[in-house]
Amino acid sequence: MKKRLFTPGPTPVPENVMLRMAAPIIHHRNPEFMEILTRVHADLKYLFQTTQPVVVLSCSGTGGMEAAVSSLFCSGDKVITINAGKFGERWGQLVRIFTGNCVEEKVEWGSAIQPERMAELLKENPDAKGVCLTHSETSTGTAADIQTLCSLIREQSDALILVDGITAVGAHEFRFDEWGADICITGSQKGLMMPPGLALVAISERAQDIINHKNGIPQYYFSLKKALKAHAGEDTPFTPAVSLVIGLDEALQMIKAEGMENIWTRHERLASACRQGCNALGMKLFSNSPSFAVTPVWLPEGVDWSAFNKALKNKNGITIAAGQDEYKGKIFRISHLGFYDELDMLTVIGGIERALKDINFNFQVGAGVTAVQKAFLEN
Ligand SMILES: *Cc1c(COP(=O)(O)O)cnc(C)c1O
């Protein structure tokens, strides 16, 4: 059976990327590798739309988040975090561990923080040293208006802006320099069409200044100061995940060939068609501000998640993502982040129809696929 992955990390990896990574290992001080890393550093600037350094860490995305919090803040620093789902909650957990002074704003799942509320939070906390945001909250499939939030925070305060862009970079428009973010993180297994194992962290000038001149929280491996120093010499502080960096070089060539604007448009189209397919099957959408990376959908009444998921996985080879926490068994999530095209959306909606039929859910077979076809062919 052909297996198909529709999860928001890990995501499918193109063959040419896998083939590059299958080549015999080379040494990381070898000029051949240094040439690759130099090119990766340059191309990552294009990915994040920045002229500032983007460092490559050998860890998953969370390692990048931890490196940012522990490299920028001191014990006692007040940091505002927005918790609109599992990953916003993670910002809060990190801040509590490292600074012990977290102002956590909870937002209902499926909604994004509103700029008016952000403005109030800044007024209530004029001493905040940072604000941690999530661009695309993967657990709820919800996107926040990062451009507006960044400009508002810049206007009203000196707080550093940390953006978890882990499922947004490569799906949603994001302009690091122009929008005024201080940190943005992504992970290799999300929009970059790569296996898991790398975190990429863009660092603004003002953040670099703080990182380089502060005696903050004790840290060793996850130090952005060390990463920045090595980056200046087109190097990494420790042995990098050599094969993954080589794979990233290949993936970034594909990204450059397609172009960031085209990639953002493609994700918007795929997300929109996916939503129309689900609607046509009589399923309700979960988010009121849907992400272009992942579509969250309420399980229809009477549909048992585990039976539905089994029919999808065991009979159709399709893996989608479950709901998390209190939404486990209530919602499911379809990813279209990274290496996906229009025919993939027909496949996943077609697979969902088959699984629904298999568990005797009452609906009109073909309605979802027809809606997806129409969405693409009429737009
Ligand atoms: C996947 C994800 C993370 C965590 O990344 P890991 O690579 O699992 O450590 C953080 N934030 C968001 C928004 C994510 O989607």
Image (cartoon, helix red, strand yellow):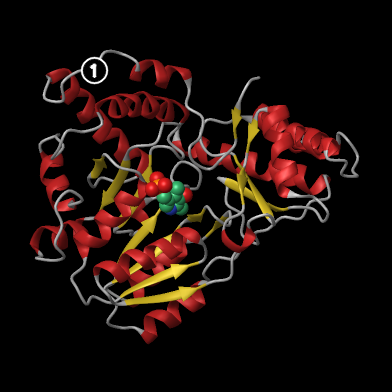
Left or right: 175 as drawn, with respect to 2 = left
Q: Residue furthest bottom?
A: 124
Toward which corner of the image does residue 79 lie, by quadrant? bottom left
Asked if 352 appears above or below 111 in the picture, the reply is above
The spot of residue 258 in percent (x, y) is 47, 28
| Left or right of residue 231: residue 294 | right
Q: How far across and down, in percent of the image, does residue 195 sit?
A: 41, 32
Q: Residue at x 26, y 39 (%)?
A: 58
Residue 308 in the image, given as x and y percentages of width and height: 74, 42
Badge 1 local density, few (<14 within 10 Å), some, or many (20+)?
A: few
The residue nearer to you, when weighing 197 against 367, is 197
In the image, taking residue 237 as reference, residue 5 lies left or right, namely: right
Cβ(mark 1) to ligand 1 < 8 Å?
Answer: no
Q: Where residue 228 sits in the image (x, y, percent)?
A: 15, 47
Identify the amino acid type marked 1. Ile
Q: How many numbered dots are placed on residues in this image?
A: 1
At a point 21% along the width and 63% down the height, the residue shown is: 72
In the picture provided, is 216 more to the left or to the right than 194?
left
Check the image and report above or below for 151 versus 293. Answer: below
- Position above or below: 206 against 360: below
Q: Which residue is mark 1?
A: 25
Residue 328 at least partly seen: yes
Residue 374 can be seen, yes or no: no
Q: Residue at x 51, y 69 (%)?
A: 113
Check disc 1 and report its element: helix, strand or loop. loop
Instruction: Give residue 1's quadrant in the image.
Output: top right
Q: Quadrant of the C terminus?
A: top right
